[in-house]
Amino acid sequence: MSTNDQAHQPPVDSTPKHPGKDVTIYLNGTPKTVQKERLTFEEIVALAFDNPPSGDGVQFTVQYSRGHSDNSKGSLVEGQSVQVKEGMEFDVTPTNRS
């Protein structure tokens, strides 16, 4: 293909066909914008704390509210995920296992 032929080719669209939609959620009262339909327990903990507490026996409790109507409130444990929606609220609390 010559350089002249390339000039007449349509531009290649490198954007994803289904880009993530910005969704504002609240983590411990702080608004955060995400571009995912689902978030895992681990992603929520990482978003809630810039420097998560660590050490022997530190675990996290994740509770949510204002979710989708079929799952509007509940809690997550490690390995679980939840579908997020605009205005959803998450309370992420570090706990010490004794």
Image (cartoon, grey):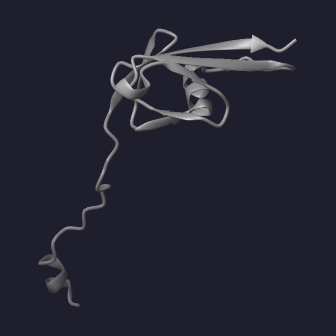
In the picture as drawn, the residue positioned furthest to the front comes out as 70
Q: With respect to residue 16, does 90 lie above or below?
A: above
Q: Nearer the viewer, residue 38 or 75?
A: 75
Q: Quadrant of residue 12?
A: bottom left
Relative to 6, 81 lies left or right: right
Q: Quadrant of the C terminus?
A: top right
Q: Number of callouts in the render?
A: 0
Kindly identify the residue that appears in the image at 66 percent across and 20 percent down.
51
Q: Residue furthest left?
A: 8
Residue positioned 15% across, 85% down in the render:
5
Res 68 visible: no
Rendered residue at 20%/84% (across/down): 3
Rendering coords of residue 72 (x, y %): 42, 21
The residue depicted at 28 percent of the width and 56 percent of the height is: 17
Q: Is residue 46 above or below residue 73?
A: below
User: Where 29 falls versus 52 (above or below)?
Assistant: above
The answer to whether residue 4 shows anywhere in this view is yes
Quarter where residue 40 is shown: top right
Q: Is 18 situated above or below 44?
A: below
Q: Position of residue 74 (x, y in %)?
A: 53, 20
Snapshot quadrant of residue 11: bottom left
Q: Is residue 72 left or right of residue 3?
A: right
Residue occupying the far bottom of the picture: 1
Q: Position of residue 44 (x, y in %)?
A: 56, 27
* Placement of the N terminus among the 4 image quadrants: bottom left
